[in-house]
């Protein structure tokens, strides 16, 4: 049965000649009390493309991801997913859109009362009710194998390291085969080797699945490894957007300072 | 005397008192904040209740989570309410025997015990015990999930947290409170009779037939089933407090405490209304 999301998606594509961006953020403002976080930000991400959003702490990078997945609402501006504006959508209608999105939280946000395999099975149990138990178990094992966690099925989140938690979080984010992947600081707090492994994993997933991805990070090395395009934020807006070389050649003081410090 | 009404002490400059003109606006601001907070809390509770209600009545239904919560609220509270009921039965038995003896009305003991337990003490004690155990547990669990972004993760996985977390818990409380009340009542009557029979032998059959003599269902059923409203209050306030938590470990502690305190308070206030309602419509 076609969902509201599918109908909206089909309607949006012909209008744009099939080239509509998967994620379109237009002139979005967001404040918390008197603190302005996003100040008219605009971004677009197409299918198969990875955009890295860089910037200092507190510049609204994570807020941007929360707005895109609808966990927060913008004060003004629009956020369109496959051409459908998500502002004001009811929770259940937003749910149809979220099924096409995977989100990796900064602290992984694994369900602490469930084992590793139960965490990954959680979205499948709720949205793939037609799947048999054995099919679901196979799918969970396959997802965990993709992120190199196939040997820790019965572990509890509290018993595994931060890097392993992020791997499990990534497997959970991929469970519903999303078309959009949002990663919030996937390498934050990890040692260089674990960071490199996570970067490799993201690159491999991009090659295989061709998702539209936004990676929020302040790790410049990771950003240039996994993303084709980078956007640098300052004071709630994009200072520069382009390939890593564009950032290197920029004359903007903040960009130079950021690259020097990173 | 200084112009502010203080006598200066040599070598010490007097503290500057808050003048009446400065005090009044600060009191007014505090009162306005309190008033604002009060209405904000009830407004948020109203919006939360509507979201939970809408989630509860629309599919998909979370049967598995509901069964888990029925077990959590019901089976795991049973030993606690049974013990509380047993203690209440003995207390009422001791008090009633003493008071009734003074007025030469010892024959009224079974009726007094039955009515005291089923109409008054059983429902309230069950409500308060469950409020303490379940209210604190739910409040703390949901608050912990909130501050560690687990509730956001549920929402990001396209699962309605109001349906999965709140509706199932509230419904479990509504369904289990009357059953737990029956268990409290049964334990209280049993221990009350036992305490009496140690002093003055009375067969259980005689105790029950005298206690329930002339009683109708309408005398007891509304009193027992009003605890479904207690369940609604406990579940709703615990889920609301838990799911709106902010501020790390301190926030989790506050949510657990507020859940118990507010649920117990509203439960007693609701009892005033319910007793009047039952007296008007079921007497």
Image (tube, coloured by chain):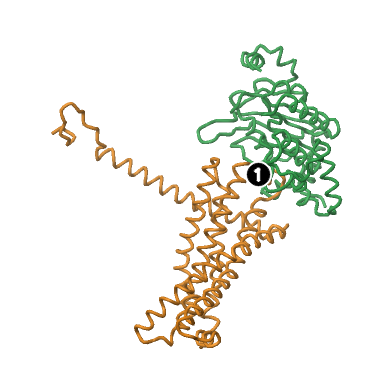
Chain colours: A green, B orange
Q: Quadrant of residue A239?
A: top right
Question: Quarter of the image holding residue A24?
Answer: top right
- Chain assignment, label 1: B
Residue neighbourhood size for the residue with mark 1, other residues' Cα within 10 Å, grouped as few (<14), some (14–19), many (≥20): many
A196, A128: nearer the viewer: A196
For residue A210, above or below residue B272: above
Query: Is residue A130 positioned above or below A40 on the image?
Result: below
- Quadrant of the snapshot with the C terminus of chain A: top right
How many marks overall?
1
Left or right side of B21 for B218: right
Task: Give SS at disc 1.
Answer: helix
Image position, residue B101 (x, y; %): 37, 83
Q: Residue furthest front?
A: B198
Q: Is residue B189 left or right of residue B272?
A: right
Q: Mark 1 highlights which residue?
A: B150
Judge whether A222 appears above or below B172 on screen.
Answer: above
Q: Quadrant of residue B30?
A: top left
B214 left or right, relative to B10: right
Name the residue: 45% across, 72% down: B91
Instruction: Left or right? Give the position of A59 relative to B23.
Output: right
Give the percent coordinates (x, y) of residue B115.
48, 79
**Residue B18 place in picture, x, y as percent:** 26, 37
Q: Write the residue at 71% across / 13% down.
A: A248
Expressed as whole percent of the image width and height from the top left, the position of residue A188 reads 67, 29
Between B107 and B264, the one lying in front of the other is: B107
Which residue is at 69% across, 61% downward?
Answer: B67
- Name which residue lies at 52% across and 77% down: B189
Q: Residue furthest left?
A: B1
């Amino acid at each position: 049965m076609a969902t509201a999301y599918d109908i909206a998606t089909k309607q949006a594509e012909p209008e744009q000649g099939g080239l509509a961006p998967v994620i379109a953020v237009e002139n979005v403002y967001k404040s918390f009390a008197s603190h302005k976080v996003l100040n008219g930000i605009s971004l677009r991400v197409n299918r198969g493309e990875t955009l890295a959003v860089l910037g200092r702490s507190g510049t609204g990078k994570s807020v941007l991801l929360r707005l895109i997945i609808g966990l927060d609402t913008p004060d003004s501006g629009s956020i369109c997913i496959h051409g459908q504006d998500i502002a004001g959508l009811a929770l259940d209608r937003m749910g149809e859109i979220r099924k096409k999105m995977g989100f990796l939280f900064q602290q992984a946000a694994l369900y602490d009362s469930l084992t590793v395999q139960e965490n990954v099975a959680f979205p499948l149990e709720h949205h793939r009710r037609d799947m048999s138990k054995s099919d679901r178990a196979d799918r969970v094992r396959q997802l965990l194998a993709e992120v190199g966690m196939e040997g820790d099925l019965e572990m509890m989140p509290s018993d595994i390291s931060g890097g392993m938690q992020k791997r499990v979080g990534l497997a959970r984010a991929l469970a519903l085969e999303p078309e959009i992947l949002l990663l919030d600081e996937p390498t934050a707090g990890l040692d260089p080797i674990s960071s490199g492994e996570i970067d490799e994993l993201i690159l491999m997933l991009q090659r295989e699945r061709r998702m539209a991805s936004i990676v929020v990070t302040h790790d410049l090395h990771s950003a240039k490894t996994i993303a084709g395009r980078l956007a640098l934020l300052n004071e709630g807006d994009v200072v520069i957007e382009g390939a890593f070389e564009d950032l290197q050649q920029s004359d903007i003081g903040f960009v130079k300072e950021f690259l020097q410090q990173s | 005397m200084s112009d502010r009404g203080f006598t200066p002490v040599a070598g010490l400059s007097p503290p500057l008192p808050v003048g009446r003109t400065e005090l009044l606006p600060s009191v007014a601001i505090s009162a306005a904040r309190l008033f604002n907070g009060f209405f904000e809390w009830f407004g948020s509770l109203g919006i939360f209740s509507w979201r939970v209600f809408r989630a509860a009545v629309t599919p998909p239904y979370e049967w598995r989570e509901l069964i888990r919560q029925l077990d959590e609220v019901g089976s795991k509270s049973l030993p606690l309410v049974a013990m509380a009921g047993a203690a209440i039965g003995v207390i009422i038995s001791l008090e009633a025997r003493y008071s009734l003896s003074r007025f030469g009305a010892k024959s009224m003991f079974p009726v007094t015990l039955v009515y005291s337990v089923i109409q008054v003490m059983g429902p309230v004690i069950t409500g308060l015990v469950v409020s303490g155990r379940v209210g604190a547990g739910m409040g703390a669990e949901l608050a912990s999930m909130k501050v560690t972004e687990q509730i956001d993760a549920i929402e990001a996985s396209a699962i309605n947290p109001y349906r999965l977390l709140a509706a199932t818990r509230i419904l479990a409380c509504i369904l289990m409170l009357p059953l737990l009340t029956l268990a409290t009542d049964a334990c209280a009557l049993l221990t009350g009779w036992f305490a009496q029979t140690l002093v003055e032998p009375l067969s259980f059959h005689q105790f029950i037939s005298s206690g329930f003599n002339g009683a109708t269902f309408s005398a007891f059923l509304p009193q027992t089933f009003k605890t479904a409203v207690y369940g609604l209050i406990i579940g709703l306030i615990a889920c609301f407090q838990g799911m709106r938590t902010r501020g790390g470990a301190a926030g989790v502690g506050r949510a657990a405490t507020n859940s118990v305190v507010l649920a117990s308070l509203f439960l007693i206030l609701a009892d005033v209304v319910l007793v009047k309602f039952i007296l008007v419509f079921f007497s």
